[in-house]
């Protein structure tokens, strides 16, 4: 099975304290540590497991600048077979539709049975997977938390639905799936894997390689633009408890008792 | 000059850090508290390739350069000294001598298991009455036919008495040289050899989740083929092993300093007194600035020593300097880190307490700070 997994380089929330930048248009990106988007990492692990079982190849792809190459290499050290970097100045500041259009062009250059994305990334919109499926005119399942290969034409996929309930679907390939965290336990990247890919050349494709009109993507083609970034002001009735975990627990119990929530 | 790490070295730092933060940080406090060596965690470290890092692929090693190895030890030490001790001792002292001095048969027999993390190997040098004065060793090996009979004991031997231990390299006196000094030879001794007993040592102040052993040899017999290298090579092998070992101890000091510094910095930015974060007070901010300067110096010194080794140039002086400086640096940084944490710094929950204790070994193990100063003073012509 030929699987393409779309990944993204995002600020690592376990390594950084994220703050809104002074211009209010973005987070403060000075000195941030980046890593692969967590959801995408689950998708890559799932792809590797499928290929381990039924054979085939996993390709990872990302839209980004030169530095995004590191997340491709990282996922290749984990076990993906190939990487493709989609990079062009014209791609900068693309909205979700722009990113999906760029990915679509890359998908059409290959022949994939299954395309996976993370359910969402740092921007939290969760829109690329669905848009990509629509542009490719392929079936789509979102928030997938289990995949079983039925044969070379069909998959059985589980989806987490409202209220913690589960839905099982049969889906025809080729298709697009957006992957939920928890679908598996992603492996650690070992030293052998790193050594295998550290000096591998990763192909870079730009707008002209992909046959994309520069004006249709990037800032020029974006029809959704961020207007403002801010931390909401605390409203009435909200109280932030501070202190060590023990202190917070004590205060919370005290408050719950005082309000009659605990007897 | 090029100070950039290679893509491979950068990836190793990131991924080992990720592993340490996910798998080690969550259990370090408990393992330390219970003085428990974890075979499970050791195997996990083996799975990602932390054993046999500088060993060729022919023996199932990772075939890394020395800077990569040191970066990996540094990243583990940044989170926990005990696990870094297991790794550093396994690579430099357990695997190193067999890899560098062993016969092809010995390497094929032992290295694949040791490089997978499924097996550990100790390095028996220190004796109850022979520490810095290694020439004063009293463990003896006497030839009897095609066998050697070993008697004596060793102490403070890392990785030598846990469920993963496969054996130890033991240095014994096999005669006298013409100048009257002892002739030493190293032997490979498998666990379970009759007459060999390995006993874990408990109630340690530091590295409490690493395995430390006392070894006893009572008329223990090993065949001739268990000699490491040649009869009489022992002293030279020991010196060469310790030169490499110093780099890994340096990495433990550097990584530990980095870890304690980061904990202190993070705390100082959050903790408020007199209406502002304590990092804004010069008394605290200057301490952290000093730590940052010294860590930068230490890293440059240690990496230079590793680079010299990679280039197959003489690195012994720089290794002694790096071992001394990085070890003592971690002492200063851990001390500042506890001080910055105030009362909380004295509590185990805040981790800097463990860094403070774990550091002390670095001034003592694999050549005390005093011995490093002797080595350095001789190199500079004193």
Image (cartoon, coloured by chain):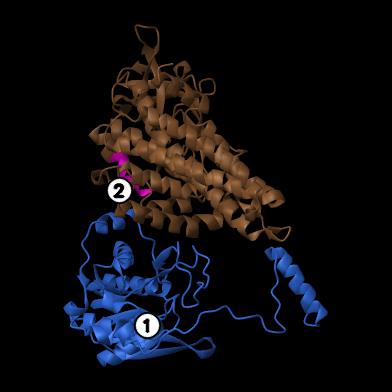
Q: Is residue A110 left or right of residue A181?
A: left
**Does residue B88 appear anywhere in the picture?**
yes
| Chain letter of the residue beneath label 1 in the structure image | A
| Chain painted blue | A
x, y (%) of residue B327? 51, 36
Report the front residue among B163 and B354.
B354
Q: Residues within 10 Å of mark 1 (few under 14, many from 20)?
A: many
Q: Is residue B226 above or below residue A194?
A: above
| Chain letter of the residue beneath label 2 in the structure image | B
- What segment carries the magenta color? B109-117
Q: Is residue B221 above or below residue B17?
A: above
Q: Are marks 1 and 2 on the same chain?
A: no
Magenta includes B113? Answer: yes
Q: Which mark is residue B62?
A: 2
Figure colour of chain B: brown
Q: Is residue A14 left or right of residue A220?
A: right
Labels 1 & 2 near each other (Cβ < 8 A): no
Magenta includes A3? Answer: no
Q: Is residue B237 above or below residue B65?
A: above
Residue under circle 1?
A178
């Amino acid at each position: 099975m030929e699987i393409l997994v779309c990944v993204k380089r995002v600020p690592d929330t376990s390594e950084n304290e994220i703050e809104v930048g002074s211009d209010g248009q973005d987070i403060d990106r000075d000195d941030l540590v980046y890593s692969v988007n967590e959801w995408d990492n689950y998708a890559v692990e799932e792809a590797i497991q499928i290929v381990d079982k039924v054979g085939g190849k996993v390709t990872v792809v990302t839209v980004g600048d030169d530095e995004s190459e590191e997340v491709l290499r990282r996922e290749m050290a984990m076990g993906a077979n190939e990487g493709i970097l989609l990079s062009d100045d014209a791609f900068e500041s693309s909205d979700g539709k722009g990113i999906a259009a760029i990915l679509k062009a890359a998908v059409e250059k290959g022949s994939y049975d299954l395309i996976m994305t993370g359910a969402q990334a740092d921007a939290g919109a969760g829109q690329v997977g669905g848009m990509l499926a629509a542009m490719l005119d392929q079936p789509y399942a979102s928030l997938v938390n289990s995949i079983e290969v039925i044969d070379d034409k069909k998959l059985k996929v589980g989806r987490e639905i409202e209220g913690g309930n589960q839905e099982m679907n049969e889906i025809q390939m080729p298709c697009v799936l957006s992957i939920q965290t928890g679908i598996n336990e992603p492996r650690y990247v070992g030293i052998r894997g790193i050594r295998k890919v550290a000096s591998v050349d990763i192909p870079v494709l730009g707008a002209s390689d992909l046959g994309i009109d520069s004006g249709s993507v990037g800032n020029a083609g974006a029809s959704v633009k961020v207007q403002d970034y801010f931390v909401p002001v605390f409203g009435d009735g909200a109280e932030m408890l501070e202190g060590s975990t023990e202190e917070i627990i004590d205060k919370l119990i005290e408050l719950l008792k005082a309000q009659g929530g605990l007897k | 000059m090029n100070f950039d790490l290679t893509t491979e070295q950068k990836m190793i730092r990131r991924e080992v850090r990720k592993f340490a933060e996910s798998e080690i940080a969550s259990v370090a406090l408990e393992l330390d508290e219970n003085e428990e060596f974890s075979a499970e965690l050791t195997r996990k470290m083996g799975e990602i390739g932390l054993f046999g890092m500088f060993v060729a692929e022919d023996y199932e090693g990772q075939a890394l350069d020395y800077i990569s190895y040191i970066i990996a030890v540094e990243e583990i030490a940044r989170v926990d000294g005990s696990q870094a001790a297991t790794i550093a001792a396994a690579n430099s002292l357990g695997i190193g001598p067999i890899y560098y001095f062993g016969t092809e048969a010995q390497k094929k027999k032992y290295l694949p298991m040791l490089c997978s993390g499924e097996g550990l190997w100790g390095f028996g040098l220190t004796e109850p009455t022979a520490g810095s004065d290694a020439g004063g060793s009293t463990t003896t090996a006497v030839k009897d036919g095609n066998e050697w009979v070993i008697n004596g004991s060793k102490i403070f031997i890392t990785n030598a008495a846990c469920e993963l231990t496969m054996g130890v390299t033991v240095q014994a006196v096999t005669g006298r040289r013409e100048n009257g000094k002892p002739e030493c030879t190293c032997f490979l001794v498998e666990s379970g050899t009759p007459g060999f007993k390995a006993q874990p040592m408990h109630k340690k102040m530091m590295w409490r989740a690493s395995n430390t052993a006392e070894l006893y040899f009572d008329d223990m017999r090993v065949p001739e083929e268990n000699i490491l290298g040649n009869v009489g090579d022992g002293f030279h092998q020991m010196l060469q092993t310790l030169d490499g070992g110093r780099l890994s101890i340096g990495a433990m000091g550097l990584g530990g300093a980095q870890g304690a510094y980061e904990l202190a910095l993070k705390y100082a930015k959050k903790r408020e007194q007199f209406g502002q974060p304590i990092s804004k007070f010069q008394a605290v901010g200057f301490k952290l600035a000093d730590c940052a300067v010294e860590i930068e110096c230490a890293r440059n010194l240690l990496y230079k020593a590793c680079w010299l080794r990679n280039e197959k140039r003489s690195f012994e002086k720089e290794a002694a300097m790096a071992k001394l400086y990085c070890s003592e640096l971690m002492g200063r940084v851990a001390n500042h880190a506890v001080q910055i944490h105030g009362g909380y710094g004295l509590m185990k929950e805040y981790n800097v307490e463990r860094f403070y204790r774990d550091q002390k070994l670095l001034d003592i193990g694999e050549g005390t700070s005093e011995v490093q100063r002797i080595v350095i003073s001789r190199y500079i012509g004193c």
